[in-house]
Image (cartoon, coloured by chain):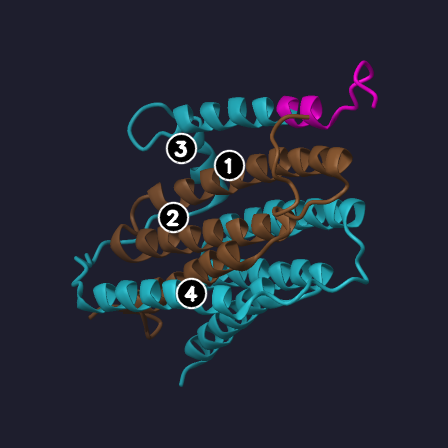
């Protein structure tokens, strides 16, 4: 089994798996919209680790994984900006961002 | 153990510990700071893999940009001295069960898979090569995703301004 500085590929994958499912756990248990957004950021970040590790171990002569990670970072930034605009708008109408109190779409 | 392995172990431990604290902390501002630690440790992983450019992007965009945005919105919408109420035990149990089942399934699959590792000479990853392939549309060129992402960022910026703008006609 090939290792990089003594660390095999599977360690990176296990690390990102744990991070991904911790994000899923947060997504399921949290009630506040901002903390749900933070869980989504954790999930996106764990996917990035996967892309980069595959790039380094399987195709070190190419850039694919690195550019995928860059694009995911850009999408995450755009998503955070739009989500926070929506959250602030919700706060103006309902004066709360708890998902259980925000139960009507019409305003 | 070598220095590199110790470094990886520290980064991995920081990531696991602080991501768990991010989703369980009952104070929202602390959760945001724990998220910052996770993102910085991820940048450390990229440095460990010798991807300096990506680590710099991670630090500036994620740790610098998104976390500041999240902290601003926390300060605008939440009372930071207030704690969240406790989550029901039933909800915790079922969510943890789902997450644990997923972790076990994925790790079992990862450990069984034989990845086709190839011995090739690694490419030079300096800023010049990255810049060239970002603007190149031939082989190893990424001009199309680069353009798409710039249009997406413009659209997201306009959308954020339009959504968050105060509407003058519909004052309640």
Judged from the image, the secondary structure of the residue bearing numbered disc 3 is helix
- Label 2 – label 4 distance at C-alpha: 47 Å
Identify the residue under disc 3: B133
**Residue B5 belongs to the span the image colors magenta:** no
Say above or below: A75 vs B156.
below
Question: Chain drawn cyan, letter?
Answer: B
Do discs 4 and 1 share a chain? Answer: no
Residue B90 % position (x, y) = 48, 67
Residue B11 % position (x, y) = 50, 70
- Label 2 – label 3 distance at C-alpha: 12 Å
**Residue B169 belongs to the span the image colors magenta:** yes
Which-is-in-front pick, marks 2 and 4?
A: 4
Residue B172 % position (x, y) = 83, 23
Judged from the image, the secondary structure of the residue bearing numbered disc 2 is loop
Circle 1 chain:
A
Depth check: B118 or A43 in front?
A: A43
Identify the residue under disc 2: B124
Identify the residue under disc 4: B94
Mark 1 residue crowding within 10 angstroms, few (<14) / some (14–19) / many (20+): some
Residue B49 in sight here: no
- Label 1 – label 2 distance at C-alpha: 26 Å
Circle 2 chain:
B
Question: Chain drawn brown, letter?
Answer: A
Look at the image and give the residue range highlighted in magenta: B158-172
Say above or below: B40 vs A5.
above
Q: Quadrant of the N terminus of chain A?
A: bottom left
Verify CB contact (< 8 Å) between mark 4 and mark 1: no
Identify the residue under disc 1: A75
């Amino acid at each position: 089994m090939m290792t990089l500085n003594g660390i095999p590929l599977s360690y990176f994958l296990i690390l990102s798996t744990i991070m991904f499912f911790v994000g899923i756990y947060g997504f399921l248990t949290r009630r506040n919209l901002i903390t749900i957004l933070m869980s989504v950021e954790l999930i996106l970040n764990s996917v990035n680790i996967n892309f980069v590790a595959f790039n380094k171990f399987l195709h070190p002569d190419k850039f694919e994984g690195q550019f995928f990670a860059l694009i995911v970072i850009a999408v995450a930034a755009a998503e955070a900006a739009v989500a926070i605009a929506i959250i602030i708008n919700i706060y103006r109408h309902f004066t709360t961002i708890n998902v259980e109190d925000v139960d009507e779409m019409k305003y | 153990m070598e220095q590199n392995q110790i470094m990886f172990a520290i980064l991995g431990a920081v990531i696991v510990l602080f991501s768990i604290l991010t989703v369980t902390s009952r104070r929202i501002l602390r959760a945001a700071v724990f998220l910052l630690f996770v993102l910085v440790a991820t940048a450390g992983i990229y440095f460990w893999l010798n991807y300096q450019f990506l680590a710099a992007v991670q630090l500036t965009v994620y740790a610098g940009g998104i976390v500041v945005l999240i902290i601003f919105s926390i300060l605008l919408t939440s009372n930071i001295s207030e704690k969240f109420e406790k989550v029901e035990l039933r909800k915790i149990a079922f969510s943890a069960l789902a997450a644990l089942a997923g972790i076990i399934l994925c790790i079992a699959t990862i450990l069984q898979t034989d990845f086709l590792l190839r011995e090739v000479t690694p490419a030079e990853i300096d800023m010049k090569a990255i810049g060239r392939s970002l603007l190149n549309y031939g082989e190893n060129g990424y001009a199309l995703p680069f353009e798409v992402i710039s249009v997406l960022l413009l659209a997201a910026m306009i959308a954020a301004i339009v959504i968050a703008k105060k509407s003058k006609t519909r004052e309640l």
